[in-house]
Every structure is written in structure tokens, then in C-alpha cells.
Amino acid sequence: MPTQPLDAPAPAAGGFGRPYDTVFADGDYLPAAQAAVSVHANALSYGTGTFEGMRAFWNGEHQQLYLLEAVAHYERLERSARILGLPLRWTAHELVEITAELLRRNQVDCDAYVRPILFLAGEVLTVRMHDIRAKLTIAVTPTPGDYIKGDGVRCMTSTWRRPCDDTMPIRAKITGSYVGPAMAKTEAIRAGFDEALMLTHDGYVAEATTSNILARYGRQWVTPPGTDNILEGITRRQVMELIAAQTGHPVLERRMHRSEVYVADEVLLCGTAATVVPVAEVDGRLIGAGVPGETTVNLRRDIRAIANRTDPRHPEWTTPVYPEGGPAGWRQP
Ligand SMILES: Cc1ncc(COP(=O)(O)O)c(C=O)c1O
């Protein structure tokens, strides 16, 4: 059962509610308290782990919960594990089934966020990746609100930069690598902005703290390439696919100057937590007319509708969680 009923008090900032109590840990479904991790765990000191963030979207009419791009997220976890040399004993498809079962056991009937983490849980103080026990946990949190406001985000360029791939493997979603984005986000909020844009070590635009950036010049959309220290987002891939289908113009992946962002006709951020959000302002300069761009507004609507299958396009992006009849017809094994 959820630890928080649907009529619970207003969600905490960032759009997340209180996590559900049942988690997946050590190959079993357990109450979260029984899945506790040692304070001596290697990952707690050094951030030696990798994680994913995926969403599930509820459709009340269908009485169904849909996992969005679950296979793609677990394939990225597999790649991250391979880069870090962490053992992962389940395939991506097995992990999707485990996640669907976890959502069913928590009887999730609202939009939710799924957080798998694969990390070095062994009580070893040495700084290394090898010969330390790894652990996989998966937890679920309701998402009753928006992670980031959807009506026009005000960004600043952060003084903190994205690490280069020779500093830390940037296409692995590494737990420890989020200190930089966390510093950048706090810097932006304390300076009165909503979000931070992060540059590469040599001054090109990379991405926001937990989302990718795309900008439009006339009919042409542009986004920084995978070799500019970005995490290549699954939402970025979806957005690029939808833009190409709608406009007939593929999105151009190329290096972007900071000042190019100032003069774009439209700028958007996209990521699993944010979905798609319009950027209204960067470093005090209005983007376009300073109001959400039409393509961005449409993409935000379309991706959310595809996610809960009110839009019939791309059913291959979603996985239904419940059998026919929805949560009411499902009994815990
Ligand atoms: C640093 C960073 N960049 C980009 C993204 C967007 O990726 P995705 O669309 O796969 O969530 C995320 C979110 O996971 C992120 O943390």
C-alpha cells in the first residue's frame, strides 16, 4: 500500500510525494526499513554507483499504469554498469518485469517515479571499484507535482561546469557525478533563477542540471552532441524523433556557443523528471518573446499523452503494469 494516500497534503518541492514503502533490494521485495544500507558502505563515501530515473504514468480511464521507456532506461543502466565495472545480474527486460511487479505490490495508481540504484554497498573504505559487494535497489515515489515549473523557466549559466569524459565517464549516470549539478542548482536558486545551464570545460553549452537542452533557429532545432559531456537523455531522443516527424527536419547535433542560446527563437529543456519545459530567459535575456514556444508546448503535451497512452503514437515507448482490470483485479502473490 502507498505510505501516502492520494488526498495527502501538498507535495514536497520538486514534485515528489513520500516514497512507497515496498522496495526491491537484494533480489527481494521488502519494506524499505529492511533494505537499509550500512553507514560504512563504500558508495556513501565515494559515490561509487550508478542509477536511473524513470517515470510511470497513470491513466484513470484505462485503469492502467504505463512505464515510460523502461527498457531504454535499464539498457542505459547496463551500459553505465559496464563502464564502471559493476556486476548487474539481471537483464534489462528482467528489470522491467521486476519494476512492474514492484509497482503492482505498491498498488501504484498515480504518476510515479522509479529510482533503481546499483552501488558498492560493501563496507570497504578503500577508494576503488573492484572486489566490493554491489547491491541493486529499486524504489518508487509518487509524483503529484511538477519537478520544474512548466510555464517558462528562468536559467542562469552556472559557474560550475560539466566534467569532461577524461575526468569522469560522462555517459554513465554516476551517483557521485551529481554533486556538480546539485551545486549548480543551488547556486541558481539562491541567485533567484529556476535552473542552471552548465558549460563544457572549454565553454560550450552542455545541458541543464538534470535535463538536456534544445534550441530553435527558424525551422532548425539544434542540440549539443553526445561528445560535449552531456548525458544523452532518453527524453532528448524522444523529442528529437517527434520534432523530425513533425517538421520533416532532423535536429542538428552540434556544438553550441553560450551566446547562441541568447538569440534562439525557442529553447527547451527535456528530461525524465522535467519531461519538456520551455525556457523563458537565460542570464537576463528573454528567449524569443519570453513566453513558452509553440513547439515546446506541443511537445510537452504530446510526450505526456504518449506516456499514458491517451495519444496512440509510439506504444513501443510504454509498458503496461497491470493485467486487464487494473489494480482492482490484481492480487498480491
Ligand atoms: C545530467 C542529466 N542530463 C540529462 C538528463 C535527461 O535524461 P533522461 O531524458 O534520460 O532522463 C538527466 C536525467 O536523467 C540528467 O541527470
Image (cartoon, rainbow, N blue to C red):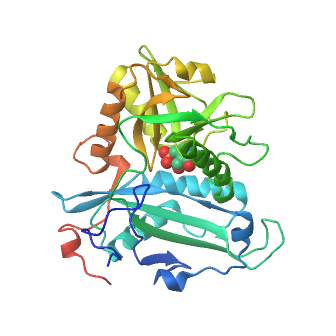
Residue 112 visible in the picture: yes
Q: Is residue 113 above or below residue 295?
A: below
Residue 256 visible in the picture: no
Which residue of the protein is positioned furthest toward the front in this rendering? 191
Residue at 66% from the left image edge and 54% from the top image edge: 179
Residue at 47% from the left image edge and 34% from the top image edge: 154
Q: Quadrant of the C terminus?
A: bottom left
Nearer to me, 135 or 265: 265
Q: Is residue 99 left or right of residue 166?
A: left
- Where does the image place residue 225, in percent across and percent down from the top left? 61, 31
Nearer to me, 296 or 282: 282
Q: Is residue 51 left or right of residue 23?
A: right
Q: Quadrant of the N terminus?
A: bottom left
Residue at 35% from the left image edge and 77% from the top image edge: 3
- Where does the image place residue 163, in percent across and percent down from the top left? 72, 43
**Image quadrant assignment for residue 135:** bottom right
Residue at 79% from the left image edge and 77% from the top image edge: 124
Q: Is residue 298 left or right of residue 72?
A: left
Q: Is residue 35 above or below residue 126?
A: below
Which residue of the protein is positioned furthest toward the top in this rendering? 218
Q: Is residue 233 above or below residue 43?
A: above
- Where does the image place residue 268, in percent across and percent down from the top left? 45, 32
Q: Is residue 213 left or right of residue 259?
A: left
Count up the numbered dots.
0
Nearer to me, 210 or 57: 210
